[in-house]
Image (tube, rainbow, N blue to C red):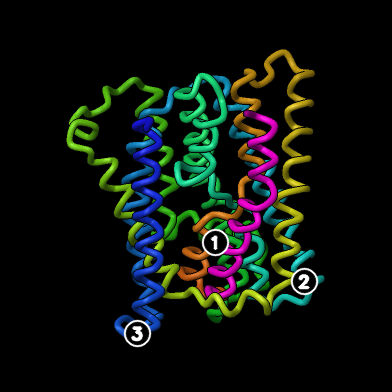
Amino acid sequence: MDPRTAKFLVFTAFCILSLGAGYLSRKRGWVREDLSKRIHFHTITWFWTLGGIFSLWLLPVTRELGWLLGAMTFTVALSAYGMIPLAKWIGCTRPQIGVMAIGAGISNSGVTLGAYLCYCMLKPSEPALAYGNLFASLQLILAVPLIYPIAVHFSEEPSDHERPIIPFILSSIWDIRSLGLFAGAFGIALSAMHVPYPHFVIDYHILDAIVYICAAGGYFGIGLRLRLGDSGKHVPHHALMAVLKFAILPLIGYGIVLLLRLTPAPFPPLLEKAFLIESLIPAGTSVVILANLYHLDARLASIIWVVNTALFLLVPLPIILYLTM
C-alpha cells in the first residue's frame, strides 16, 4: 500500500473513532454535551493557530498564490453570503441561517478529503497534494474576515445584530478566536522572507501531532453534538446545501477557470484540475466548530456536515472518479 494512502486511512480511522467516542460519551452520560464548546474553543484558538503557522511556512509565495487567493475570496464570500437569503427562504431561524451560511462557505478541503482526492486522482501527485493543502490553508485565513462576522451576526447570544457588517468584520478580526488569521499571515511572511523552516518540526513529527490533536478535539466535540435521528427533520436544509455544494459552486469554479484562461496568467493545468475538484467538496467540520464557538444551532450543524458528506460520497465522488481515472 502507498505510504500516503496508509497514512490517510490511519488518520481517517482516528477521526471516526474520535467522532464515535464523542457520540458515545454523550449517549452514555459520561460527558456533558455543552462541554463541546470549550473543547472546540481551545482546539481552534491554540492548535489550529499553531498548525496554521507551520503549514503556511512551507508554502512558496508565487503569483499563483495571489490568483488563487482572489478566486477563493470570491467563491467563499459569494457562497456564504448568497446562502443567507436562501436559508431565510426555506424558513431557517437566525442560528440556522448562520449554520447554513458557514457550511456553504467552508468546505472539507484539507487532507481529510479534498487534498487527498487531488493526490489520488491527479498527476504528478505530490504537487497536487500541495495544491489541495493550499486550499485548506487559505480557507483558514479567509474564514476570519468573511465567515466569522456571519457567525457573530446570527448568534443566539444577545448582541447588537443591527450593526453594519464592517464593524462586525473588524471586531471579529480582533477576537481571540481569530488568532488563525494572524498565524496564517505570519506563516506566509516567514515563507516570503525565506526564513529556514525548523527541521525539528518534521523530524519529530510535531506538525503531525498538531493535526491529530486538532482532529481529536474537533471530531470529539462534533460527536457530542451529533443526533443522527434529526436528519429527517431538515430535508430542505440538506437539499439546499447539496444544490449549492454540488451544482452551483462547481459551475462557478469552472467559470473562474475559463475566465482566467483569457488572461495572460491563467492557472497552470494541474492547479486548474485541483481547483475544479475542490469546487465539489462538501461542507467541512468547521461548520460544527464555529456553530459551537458562536452559539449557533450546533445540532443542525453536525447533521448538515454528516449528510452533506454522505451525499458527496454517493453522487459527486463517483462522477469525479469516472472523469479522472
Report the label total: 3
> Circle 1 sits in a helix, a strand or a loop, which is it?
helix
Q: Residue at x 33, y 63 (%)?
A: 42
For discs 1 and 2, the disc positioned in front in the rendered view: 1
For discs 2 and 3, the disc positioned in front in the rendered view: 3
Which callout, 1 or 2, points at the residue further toward the start of the chain?
2
> Circle 2 sits in a helix, a strand or a loop, which is it?
helix
Q: Residue furthest front?
A: 1
Give the distance between the C-alpha atoms of the residues marked 2 and 3, in whole angstroms.
36 Å
- Expressed as whole percent of the image width and height from the top left, the position of residue 250 reads 73, 41
Residue beneath disc 3 = 28
Which callout, 2 or 3, points at the residue further toward the start of the chain?
3
Q: Which mark is residue 44?
A: none
Q: Which mark is residue 88?
A: 2
For discs 1 and 3, the disc positioned in front in the rendered view: 3
Q: Quadrant of the C terminus?
A: top right
User: What is the three-letter code of the residue carrying label 1?
Assistant: Val
Residue beneath disc 1 = 287
Q: Which residues are magenta?
A: 298-325
Nearest the viewer among 151 and 288 is: 288
In the figure, 299 relative to 173: above or below? below
Is 178 situated left or right of 135 in this image?
Answer: left
Query: Residue 117 is drawn in which quadrant?
Result: top right
User: What is the three-letter code of the residue carrying label 3?
Assistant: Arg
Q: Do callouts 2 and 3 mark residues in contact (Cβ within 8 Å)?
A: no
